[in-house]
Amino acid sequence: MQLVPAKPTDRVGQERSQMKNRRVLSFRRFANAWILCAPLLWGTCGYRTPLLPPSCILSVDPSALDLGEVPPGGQATGTLTIANLGGAACNVGGFGFAPNSDPWFALGPQVPPAIVVEPGERATVAVTFSPASASVPLDRAGTLVFGSDDWHRPRVDVALAARVLTHCTLAVTPNAIDFGHVALDATATRSVDIANVGDGACEIGKIALTEQSDPEFSLAPGQADPLALAPGESQSIAIAFHAVNPAEPHQKNGELTFETTDAKQVTTVVQLTAYIDVGCSLTMTPASLDFGNVMLNTTSAAAVTLGNDGSDTCHVSGIALGQGSDSNFTLDGGQRLTLDVAPGSSQSILVHFGAFDSAPPHLRTGTLVFKTGNTRMPDASVPLSAYVNSVCVEASQWIYTVDGTGLFSRFDPTTATFTNIGRLDCPDYSSAFSMAVDQNAVAWVLYQDGNVFKVDTATGKCQSTSFQVGQHGLNTFGMGFVFDPSTGLDTLYIAGGISLGSTTQSELATVSFPSLVVNPIGTTNGWPELSGTGDGTLWGFFPGSNSPTQLSTLVRIDPATGATLETYGYKDMPTSGNWAMKFWGGSFWIFLGNSIYRVDRNSPQTFHTVIANSSYAIVGAGVSTCAPLH
């Protein structure tokens, strides 16, 4: 705000106005000086610093009070010393106990409502513990609270502890209970026997099951809590187990806990176990049966395996093909229509599909149905599917390989043998890097300089292609065809980059035919050799030297995004060497170094050594999606 003098009407008025303004400005200077000086020490502005008044400083000893062991009907007294270390009197009062304090704690009879402690003096406060009986828990706790005018601690809390002294001696049997096998929907009851073998009264209380116990365990209805035992008496705690959950695991566990006035076993834990007897519990593997690509005028067979995780034999009956199933699905001629599956054993149902009709739709479906023998789930069905492929040729059923010398061969997984076809005569000075085979048994071979050649799988003869090297930075890559039964499309996928020096991720793409144009999709983990399956999945394999985990790794890849859907690492498999991988007959065939390994798709966590040291160092392998799926 700015000062504005009144307009003078004469000379006297002007002088008065000027004097008024000078007085206002003088006051402002004084006020500003005061504001600047106030935060500083008084002495620096020409004033003396005032002395602070003396205050109360309280000391309490001990900070926690333990009154020890006290028998029922007895009394123990503990004393607190309150000292004043300050220069002014301390006013102390409001003595009492926190709400959660044990009621057997009390103030001593001489404690006044308030105490004045002069500087340098001390006062005492007595606390008593008087247990009325020997009851659980033996350990008792409380908090003495009071107030003071010590501004550092206006409220004082002193922790209190005491223990009830008893002569209780208990015998608890058993220390673990096994309910054994309990039939589903049945209830079994067991008990823990507790006897007083001492010369003093005993109490058992806080009887409960721990939170970690399976919910099938419970205290029996009407269980008393607490229990009182005179010398020589005994009582039981009853526990029930109600078998209601048929899901795995069938083994159930729990813990019974209770507290006692026996000082040697204040808290007792009894382990509980039970096994739910589910009777017949049938499993089906696979849950759906897909025959994949079945070449026209050929027949494929596959099995559904029935297992029994239960404890009674499953009497399977009524095995048949469901209503509306395609007529090309048939049961095996020797297939029994009833089966007995004993606990822990398995039986198979063999189904055939004959691709004898090329009329659309090429995707055929059906259902395998049967009675399980399980009264809770009496009916079961397994979806069936197959794709009639009129494009496939007989030669596309095999795995084809090329080694580091250019030797082109055919590998038969059923016998684990190679048949040499010839040495590649591709017009390229580098060596083969990877390979894929289409449904017409044409091999597409990539060389290390990025050129792609067509190879006749019958003769090994090469033919140049119009493939442009280095499209989207993919100079070298793994490759494999993926067949989608729902659309009938066979697509070539590739994964790689500029060089193998960068192996954390690689680019995933497809190749269009006949243009051989690369179409990027995204990135995928590692630098995998690829293989498709006849039922539409894409898989990759790379050795440990190309893996962040340092394990040779098999992965399932999302063909739409490149994301990893499943990962399986093999710690005992070699981690380096030339590598290739293709899917045939329900298994992945891995060529690594000079060895060949097999990983079954139904149990991909483990691998099997097929050939430990062959004369073939495979660098590329190809198999069409017409290869057997099972």
Image (cartoon, grey):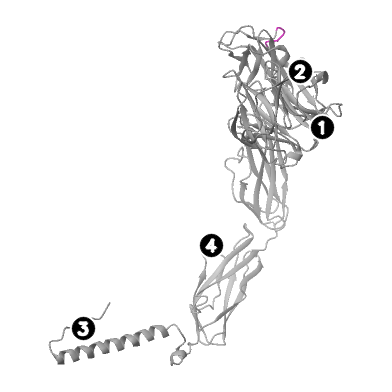
Numbered tag placed on residue 5 in the rendering: 3
**Image position, residue 261 (x, y; %):** 66, 57
Tags 4 and 3 touching, CB below 8 Å: no
Q: Residue 509's quadrant in the figure?
A: top right
Relative to residue 342, is residue 187 drawn left or right?
left
- Helix, strand or loop at mark 4: loop
Q: Secondary structure at mark 2?
A: loop
Alpha-carbon span between mark 1 and mark 4: 73 Å
Q: Which residues are magenta?
A: 333-337
Badge 4: few (under 14), some or many (20 or more) residues near its Cα, within 10 Å?
Answer: few
Query: Is-magenta flag for residue 304?
Result: no
Q: Where 206 sits versus 242, above or below? A: below
Q: Which quadrant of the structure image shows residue 72?
A: bottom right
Q: Nearer the viewer, residue 546 or 630?
A: 546
User: Where is mark 4, residue-wise?
Assistant: 100
> Going from the N terminus, do you reach mark 1 or mark 2 first?
2
Give the mark nearest the N terminus, 1 or 4. 4
Tell us which disc is closer to us: 1 or 2. Answer: 2
Indicate whether 256 appears above or below 47.
above
Q: Name the kind of residue labelled 3 in the image.
A: Pro
- Given residues 69 and 184, the one toward you in this image is 184
Q: Amino acid at mark 2?
A: Lys
Closer to the chain start, of discs 2 and 4, is: 4
Q: Residue 26, percent across and down?
A: 30, 89
Q: Secondary structure at mark 1?
A: loop
Viewer can see residue 186: no
